[in-house]
Amino acid sequence: MRTLGIGPDGTSVGAVGLGCMGMSYAYDPGGRDDDASVAVLHRALDLGVDLIDTADVYGPYTNEELVGRALADRRGKAFLATKAGFVAGETRLRRNGRPEHIRAAIDASLRRLRTDHVDLYQLHRVDPEVPLEETWGAMAEAVRAGKARMLGLSDVTVEQVRTAQRVHPVAAVQAELSLWTREATAELLPFTAREDIALIAYAPLGRGFLAGRFGSARDLPDGDYRRVNPRFQEENFAANLRLLDGVRRVARRRGVTPAQTALAWVLAQGDHVVPIPGTKHVRYLEANAAAAGIRLTGDDLALLDGLPAAVGARQ
């Protein structure tokens, strides 16, 4: 696995990471298998897929507990990232960037993760009711206390990154980035490259769509959140198959899978970009990791860049 640097101290991480949300939250809740997920996490570290990404709200809380269990005897092999800034309500998530919440959240995350520090502590979303400087200042306290090595932001604007940087360095920014969500390529991607900030690309497979394993929205498991995602609704799903057809064309001529092609496109967006595809299956993990070795040609990239935008709102 090739690596790239993240943060000011020269830390290296594998070019492909692992998003853990779907192991216990949002996707296929009836298919949860913690033992299988632990096996995936262990195999990931063996392959050099060492950026392990979770969040307190996933579950809520159960995903951090799962990751903590899996890493209990191999913490030193992982670059462990978690997030705070969401609170799970009865019907929906709400943002909470109050400093007192952040201070309590890091301590609770460390207990669930069975560690004394995380490598990357991220603000899941900016709370519009709290000045970002106050939230970020509380997160910087975690670094000074040795509870976090570095800090990151998720789903933010360039101006919000600049605001945070004036308080404490930003090591990484998370953004949804895939062939069906390309908005980050316009401004955020070049900005993070210039500032030497890692861009962690979540949902790089279009929430599984670009892997080509679903023939229609009806193939999604009961209780799966994607059943209400606008892009997976029947009319939009059918339209988005045109995008998938283009991915499949490139995959066939390169002798790789559609998922590997989609990941290779994300990796081609910059040497500072780390996609974090999620999976509960070792075979898919291994295929995703192998995408780090795929180099798309100029013709491949031109075809993929020219594919139509996804139909339906991002959610």
Image (cartoon, rainbow, N blue to C red):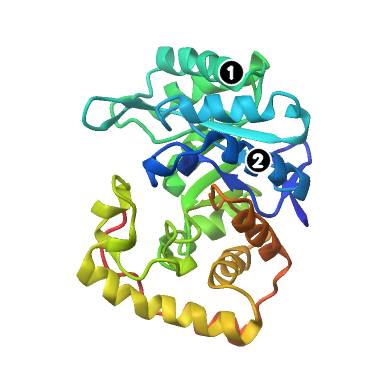
Q: Position of residue 212 (x, y in %)?
A: 45, 70
Quarter assignment of residue 254: bottom right
Task: Give the percent coordinates (x, y) of residue 229.
Answer: 27, 54
Given residues 284 and 235, the one toward you in this image is 284
Q: Up-down: is 105 above or below 14?
A: above
x and y percent of residue 267 in the render? 62, 63
Instruction: Give me the disc on residue 39.
Output: 2
User: Does residue 284 show up?
Assistant: yes
Please report the residue visible at 45 percent of the width from the left and 36 percent of the height from the top: 24
Q: Amino acid at mark 2?
A: Ala
Judged from the image, the secondary structure of the residue bearing numbered disc 2 is: helix
Closer to us: 38 or 55? 38
Q: Residue drawn 43% across and 40% down?
A: 160
Is 260 placed above or below 119 here?
Answer: below
Residue 110: which numbered mark, if any?
A: 1
In the image, 262: left or right of 291? left
- Three-letter code for the amino acid on which mark 1 is drawn: Leu
First-in-chain label (1 vs 2)? 2
**Which type of secondary structure does the marked residue at label 1 adopt?**
helix
